[in-house]
Image (cartoon, helix red, strand yellow):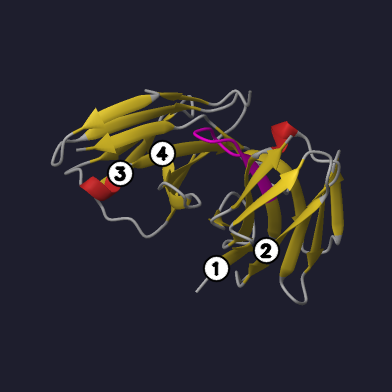
Amino acid sequence: ETGVTQSPTHLIKTRGQQVTLRCSSQSGHNTVSWYQQALGQGPQFIFQYYREEENGRGNFPPRFSGLQFPNYSSELNVNALELDDSALYLCASSSTSGSLYEQYFGPGTRLTVT
Amino acid sequence: KNQVEQSPQSLIILEGKNCTLQCNYTVSPFSNLRWYKQDTGRGPVSLTIMTFSENTKSNGRYTATLDADTKQSSLHITASQLSDSASYICVVDHDFSGGGSNYKLTFGKGTLLTVNP
């Protein structure tokens, strides 16, 4: 176990709805990254939060947004859900101490959009 | 465009056999190369991390190699076990700020390894 937790484990939403996914980072980690992993694909970088600020973003539309809280936990919000948003959403926490930025992944949230 | 290509897409081997998975990348600037193991429906777990100056890194039965000149890496698994059945993902990261936490990981699609008894 990495110490990174995500909730909920599974979620079913309908097209057009909004969803919020949550991530608790490992103790001592100040950076959280979010990834989308479609079936049979590698994870795709959505964005990263460092000390409550967005710190880099992948090729995802603005309806994907996030927050990081003072305790470094994080939320991923997706508005106007589309069928293609169905995927495993992973968060990973890391620390800026050290040079290799080891990322520890949570178990993921499986989102199904119908 | 930053890309990470892995081969083969899938591989079936018998328990106890060795295997080698390949990774080619075009990510630039390059900082580190990582190999992750991902069980179905779970988050990836780190196996090895290598900086651009390292040629090899071992973690038990897993040995990763890196040739930064040809931009190729391999993951060698020795004496495979049934529990090695998983997707193995090659990941390249680049620090686009030169420091701090401004970095991005680019993932390959993974090689799905099945170890049969």
Chain containing mark 2? B
| Residue A49, numbered circle | none
User: What kind of element bears circle 2?
Assistant: strand
Q: Amino acid at mark 2?
A: Cys
**SS class, disc 1:** loop
* Cα–Cα gap, marks 1 and 3: 25 Å
Residue A111 is situated, as x and y percent measured from the top left of the image, at: 32, 35
Q: Same chain for the residues at labels 1 and 3, yes or no?
A: no
Q: Residue at x 78, y 35 (%)?
A: B81
Residue type of the residue flagged with mark 4? Leu
* Magenta part, dominant SS: loop
What residue would you read off at disc 2?
A: B23
Q: Mark 4 or mark 3: which is in front?
A: 4
Q: CA distance from mark 4 to mark 3?
A: 16 Å
Q: Is residue B16 left or right of residue B30?
A: right
Give the spatial CA distance, label 2 vs label 4.
Answer: 23 Å
- Give the chain of mark 1: B
For residue A34, which quarter of the picture? top left
Q: Is residue B116 above or below residue A82?
A: above
Query: Dot 2, how many residues are within 10 Å of its Cα: few (below 14), some (14-19), or many (20+)?
Result: many
Q: Nearer the viewer, residue A48 or B45?
A: B45
Of badges 3 and 2, the one in the foreground is 2
Residue placed under numbered mark 3 in the picture: A65
The region drawn magenta spans B35-44
* Residue B3: image tag: 1
Task: Please give the chain letter of the residue carrying mark 4.
Answer: A
> How packed is label 3: few (under 14 Cα within 10 Å), some, or many (20 or more)?
some
Rendering coords of residue A13 (x, y %): 21, 32
Residue carrying label 4: A88
